[in-house]
Structure formats: structure tokens, C-alpha cells
Image: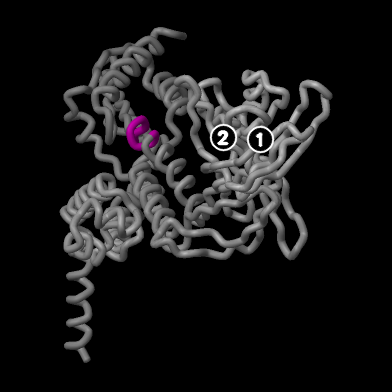
Amino acid sequence: MNKNNKNSNNIINRLWSFFVSVKLTVFLLLTLAATSIIGTFIPQNQSPAAYINTYDETVYRIFSFIDIFDMYHSWWFRCLLLLLVINIIICSIDKLSSVWKIVFVKNPKFNISKFRNLSSKKEFVTSSATETLLNKYKKNISKNFKYIKVNRTEKGFYIFAEKGRWTRLGVYIVHFSVLLLLLGGLIGSIFGFEGYINITEGETKQIIRLKTAGEVYKLNFGIRCDFFKVSFYDSGAPKEYRSGLTLIEQDKPVLQQDIKVNVPLRYKGINIFQSSYGAVPPRYAALNFLSNESGMKYQEKAEFGQEINLPENSGKLIIKKFTRSSNFMGHNMGEAFLATLMLKDKSPVEIILPVRFSNFDKMRKGALIISANSPPYYTGLQVTHDPGVWLVYAGFIAMIIGCCITFFMSHQSICLEVTWKGKENIVMVAGTANKNRLGMKNKIKKLAQRFEAIKEKP
């Protein structure tokens, strides 16, 4: 039984020694940095065909086996994060016990010899009465230091004061913030998702295609695209595009909101971003005709390759195809229908019907002005869910607070000793800090000057 206990203790001690090692911390950080660089250079979550096209099939199989193509969700990357979490926790616990005794002690230990031996101490002589000095110095020091201890000696007194003990916990706040960041990342990696969905105007969809491995995920609500609008610069580049979305739960609309780039919709922890857009491949062309002679307006649907009669018996038209990008005298006209126009008693001509410019055909100066409606658009949405994001936000806030405490605040102790000698008193001022020793040295110098000035006042 005793032997079993001894073996168990040995195993625990070995594990403790393994995880308390700073070398392990450095190794894990370097490994995470190196693997993250690999993940940056190798595009993640591409299609197998794209990887095989870039690498040969053998390399693709090896990389795929060790999850290089989705490394941030791989088991080994999560294990590295988990090991780092355990390492930070055990290192913090191991060091915290000694710091705890300093921070939360009621009566801190005080060794006056330590202050007497400091090279930065300052001394001056005063003829003021000892009791007068005690009252004045005590009152002055208590303004800046929370803890004060006064001890009388055979030849005078000394005052010990300190503040900022709690700032020694700053580094543990930083450790805690790193834990929050790592845990937030792990939770997001395990329980979160990122996917995409294309929805045509008027359509409702509930299933998204996940970014990882092309799997699908069914949302708890439906997304309906009420409308999609896009505006363009003169160059043809998109200026702004927005979608009117309605979320539907149990056949009832629960939320309506317009979204555009950088203005997402958020619902029950799920974020919906405007990601892309595109025109649905049209099955026919919806055409508009304006007669210059009669002023009459007509509308007609034209199937691809089918000959239709023009209004007012002016001829025939065949829609040949739809193109995403058309060109006219070197200018990009954007999406357009290409058609063959056959007017009576005239030879057939090829015409362009850009959907963005309804009066484009006016330049032809024909009896009819022909224009085509834009085909229906689909809106491309990015749908994400990251349950660990609040831990990440909390981690960032904690890290800022912890760094401010760690780098800009310190545990400061001062000692003021007054020793009677003949008809005068010798005053010694000294102090230490666990950080910024140079700043503490300057502070002692200023304190000594202030105390020296105090003795002159009545």
C-alpha cells in the first residue's frame, strides 16, 4: 500500500516537474509560432483538387493525413494549446504561494539593516525635536502610503511604510489573460463554425456549407433574402452592396435587418456578414421596348436562341447569350445580354444590352429602344459562430490591465529613521521597489528633500 502511494507520488512529482518547466513553455510557444507560420503559407480549407494541383498527390496525402490543410482545427494543434494551458496554470500555482505570503500578510517583515545598507539612501541633520519630527513625518508619509508602522528606539524612532503589494499579482493577471485567450480559442475551434450560403432574392435557406471540408450545417432558423441592391462606380467596380434579410423561426419572422460590408447581423451568438454577391444565371431575358414613333412601352420575355417578334411588327430578335462582362469601345459595360437584331428590310446586326445602362441602345438611333432587366441576384453571406469570443475579449482586457500593472506599477517600501545625536537628529531616508529601481532612487531623493524642508516649518 505504502509502495503504491510512493509510486503515485513519484508520478505526480514527475508530471509536476515536467509542466512547471519554463523550457516547456518556450518549446510550446516556439512550436505554436512555427506551425502558425506553416498555416499562414499553406492556404487552409481549400478543395482537394486545388491542393493536388499545387502539390503532387503524394504530398497531398501526407499533408492531409496530418491535417496540415486544416491545422487550426487539428487534434495536435489543440493538444499544443492544451499543454500550454496546463503549463501556465502549474507555473502560476508554483510561484503564487511565495507571492501570496507577501501580498496578503498582515504584518510584513521589516529589516532596518536592509535599508541602512542601501547605497541610494539619503541623510540630513535637523535640530527639530524628535516628537515634532515623528508627528510631521508620520502625517506626511500616510498621505502616500497605505501601510505604516512606527517603532521607537533608544535613540529615536523609525517609520516603515509600503504600498502596492498587490501589484505583484500583475504578472498573474497576464497569465490569466493568456489562459482566457487560449481557452477562448480552443472553445471556438471545437464548438464554433464558419460557413457560407448564397441566397437568391425572395428565397429562404437554413443550411450553410461549412468552410472546413465542405460539410453542411443546419441553422436553428431560416434566412430569407428580401432584396439585394448593388451600386457601382463609373469604372464598373462595385461601390456598395447590401441585403435585406429576415430571420424566420417556426414559420414566423423574428428579425429583419439590412446588412452590408462591415455591418453584420447578429442573432443568438451567430454572426451573418455580407460576403459576396452575384447574378443568378438567367434562363431568359426580360426585355423592355420603347417605340420612338408611338411612345408605347412593351415588355417581352425572350428565351435564349429563340426568335421573338418585335413590337409594332418592326422585325425579330434573338437573344444569344448572357455575359458577366461586356466591352464597348474599350469600356467595361458589365453584365449584358448579347443579341442579334433583324429589322425589316435591313441586314441583321449584333447588339449589346447592358443591364446597368437602360438607354444604351438609344445610341443605335433605331425606331425601338431595347433594354434588358438585370437578372436576379443572389447574396453571398458568411455565417459564423464562435462561443469562445467573449473569453477572448475578456482575455484582451485582462492582458491590458495586467500589462499596465506589471510594467507601470510596483511594490514600494520606504524607511525613515531618526536618530538623536547630541543636540541634533540625524534623519535617514531609504526605499526599495521590486521594479523600476532608478525611479525609486529618484523618489527617495525627492522625499528626502521634502522631509528636510518640513523640519524648517513651525
Q: Nearer the viewer, residue 103 or 359?
A: 359
Residue matched to label 2? 336
Which residue appears at 60% of the width and 31% of the height? 353
Is residue 407 inside the magenta stretch?
yes
What crowding class fits label 2: few (fewer than 14 Cα within 10 Å), some (14-19), or many (20 or more)? many
Residue 309 falls in image quadrant = top right
Instruction: Tell me the quarter of the picture where residue 371 sits.
Output: top right
Of label 2 and label 1, which has the lower sequence position?
2
> Residue 318 placed where, x, y %?
61, 41
| Marks 2,1: beta carbons within 8 A | yes
> Which residue type carries mark 2?
Ala
User: 214 or 388: which is nearer to us?
Assistant: 214
Q: Give the residue pinned by disc 1.
A: 372
Q: Position of residue 154 (x, y in %)?
A: 28, 32
- In the structure shown, which secondary structural element does the residue marked by tag 2 occupy? strand
Magenta stretch: give its range.
Answer: 404-411
Q: Residue 323: image x %, image y %?
A: 51, 39
Q: Is residue 341 above or below residue 283?
A: above
In the image, is 310 to the left or to the right of 52? right
